[in-house]
Image (cartoon, grey):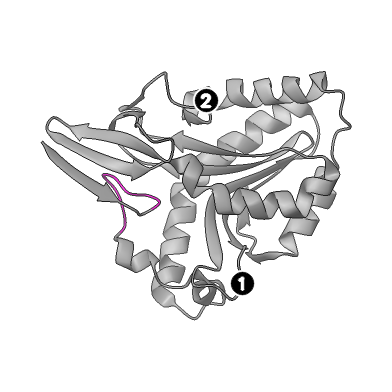
Amino acid sequence: MERIKLQHPLAGNNAVSTAALRTDFSAAAKGQDLGQTSWKVQRRHECSPLSGRIQSLLEAMTGDPCFVRRGVLLEHAPGTLNPVTWLDCLAVTPFGVFVVDQYDWTGTVTRSSSEEEVVLHEKPGVVSIQTSPLRRAKPALRYLRSVVGHCGCPVESIAVFADSSCTLDPALPVNLLQAIELRHFMRSRLNQFRDSHARFAAAANIAANLQSRTADWGEGG
């Protein structure tokens, strides 16, 4: 059985090469790296159905303004070797801020012996050990919580497996889900927030604050 370990955020069947994404994203944010700029345009296009779905379900669910951006670059660690984090989608709602990354894997995803990893069974005889999507999102979550934590606004990450042929082990964390499960997940988070009797956040103010702190605020709609 072939076992490989990949570190790329989008590793799997349709992954871009790891070397390509080691280029500093801050250059692409300023339009200085044409290769990375092209990748950003392509990735935002690929995530457009996901961001549109999130926007529609949030608006129908809350009746309040929600802000969904795709292809956001957070400069979470300036001055370090990896200063910028890419987010496929960022949803700012009155009941929480959600980092949503799309995974285009096929096969079956199961738990690993380590909480930091998952196992991707791509096809018979081929198993790849992947860093958990939730582990990959931790730098972004730490940064966002430092920015919006004073608002009492929950911050979570979600990994959406967009390919309908990708099967998820029920034992995986609930934040790893398929696109058809998004509405149920968001509804459960909304109900949890209501039950906490916390005050709903001003999503427009939070979005404006985050926009002022991002290397690239991405695209909406």
Q: Residue at x 87, y 23 (%)?
A: 197
In screen coordinates, is 1 left or right of 206? left
Q: Label 1, label 2: how many angstroms apart (C-alpha)?
A: 32 Å
Say what amino acid the circle numbered 2 marks: Val
Q: Is residue 4 in sight in this rendering?
A: yes
Q: Position of residue 125 (x, y in %)?
A: 12, 33
Residue 70 in sight here: no
Q: Secondary structure at mark 1?
A: loop
Q: Is residue 199 left or right of residue 52?
A: right
Q: Which residues are magenta?
A: 9-16
- Measured as percent of width and height from the top left, residue 202 is found at 86, 43
79 drawn magenta: no
Corner quadrant of residue 112 = top left
Q: Nearer the viewer, residue 17 or 35?
A: 17
Neighbor class of circle 2 (other Cα within 10 Å; few <14, some 14-19, many 20+) is: few
Residue wearing tag 1: 78
User: Was residue 11 drawn as part of the magenta stretch in this picture?
Assistant: yes
Measured from the top left, where is residue 218 in percent x and y?
60, 59
For disc 2, the marked residue is: 174
